[in-house]
Amino acid sequence: MFVSDISTVATAFAMNRFMSGTAFHGASPGVDNAGLLVSNLVNPGTGYLGWVVANPPNGGNTTTLASMRTLADIVATCSAGTKAQCSTFYSVARAPRGSKPDSIPSALQAIARNPWHNPGAIYGLPRTTTYTPTLTKAPSAWVFSLKYVGGGFDAPGRMAFDAQGNVWTGNNWMPPGNSGGLSLVGLDPAGQPLTGSPFRGGGTQGIGFGTAVNPTNGHIFTASYGLGRISEYLPDGTAVSPATGYTTGSLSKPQGIAFDQKGNLWIPNFGNNTLTIYLGADPAKAINVPGTAASPITKPFAIAIDAQGRAWITNNSTSGGAGWVLPATLNADNTVTLGSPVKGGGIKSPQGISVDSAGNLYTANLLGKGIT
């Protein structure tokens, strides 16, 4: 492996989740997929820039390459400099509430894990002019983002990841008009199109925000908003649902679908203010759940599943109100218990929703100015 200042920067950012000092540890496929991302930034065998970061739609079209070069020039003052120069770099790179790094890799790891911390101070450190062109001003955060355009994208909506780290997303529109897109896009963990992408069939048309992967078998499910149907694909992209899709369960303008840990598919029906569940992802075992006066379901958009298997559904008021998030529990007898609406905290027309590893929920507020 070719080692240089810029290859060190690239490796530290791509592998930071799995770094421990100067070693890498982690389970497959995560650590393997991170290794693939290194190659997008730098060629490990030659030390030259990776093809993805060096060429359109990246290259000079984004700030990632300039950010890499800037950090590499800063690192160079330490790798070829004095202990005092390294100490200054380590002090500025130190993570909030963290200990002072004692090596270049640990300093870069701190920056990669806390990209928002001290970006201006880091940018202002002494640096060489080995790598050019560099940033012309301090970034708001040290983030290396890459654009991927292959695979047949046409207004992609929500993304879903399978167990191998492949990303799946549906096409919402089909240019040049505004008719619904007819395909599903799949990219491998390095951002390259999966063989056969984009995938068609199974009733897909205008997926919008509805893409989810079944954790029990890796099948990909999509929701076609305008036509009110669900489509199913095998992990290799082969459509297995009929040409008309699955329509059982009183589907109506389904949006942000989600799977629970047992492989039940939860479907919010934006069009008729109900919730549909495909038990075991089987459309023949569909149940439909309306809201109640105490637990209303109104213009439901997306669903997140917490560690207990409980669903959290974003709802939007039809009378100008702020909206709410509604919890729902699937019981052992396949009945559903709706909880009390969660309001406040800046919730205003909540759309997307996610849950983190600690069980905290976050909603994206369409008409608000932040995240709740």
Image (cartoon, grey):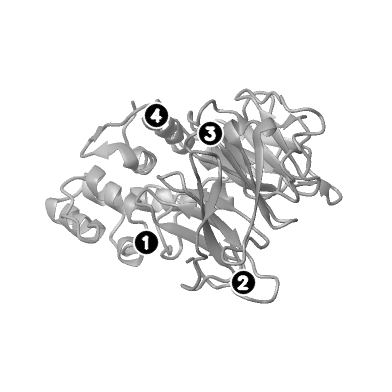
Q: Earlier in the sequence, mark 2 or mark 4?
A: 4
Residue 109 appears in view = yes
Q: Nearer the viewer, residue 212 or 199?
A: 212
Q: Earlier in the sequence, mark 1 or mark 3?
A: 1
Front label number (1 vs 3): 3
Residue 250 location (% of width, % of height): 74, 45
Report how far apart the C-alphas of labels 2 and 1 lie in the structure.
26 Å
Q: Nearer the viewer, residue 91 or 165?
A: 165
Q: What number is the disc on residue 263?
A: 3
Q: What number is the disc on residue 44?
A: 4
Q: Earlier in the sequence, mark 4 or mark 1?
A: 4
**What type is the residue that disc 4 sits on?**
Pro
Q: Earlier in the sequence, mark 2 or mark 1?
A: 1
Residue found at the very far right of the displayed protein = 177
Q: Nearer the viewer, residue 288 or 228?
A: 288
Q: Quick check: 15 left or right of 317?
A: left
Residue 18 location (% of width, % of height): 31, 37
Give the residue at x 45% y 38%: 41
* Label 2 SS: loop
Q: Earlier in the sequence, mark 2 or mark 3?
A: 3
Give the quarter of the image for residue 192: top right
* Label 4 SS: loop
**244 to 12, vertically: above or below:** above
**What type is the residue that disc 2 sits on?**
Leu
Q: Quick check: 358 left or right of 283?
A: left
Report how far apart the C-alphas of labels 4 and 1 lie in the structure.
27 Å
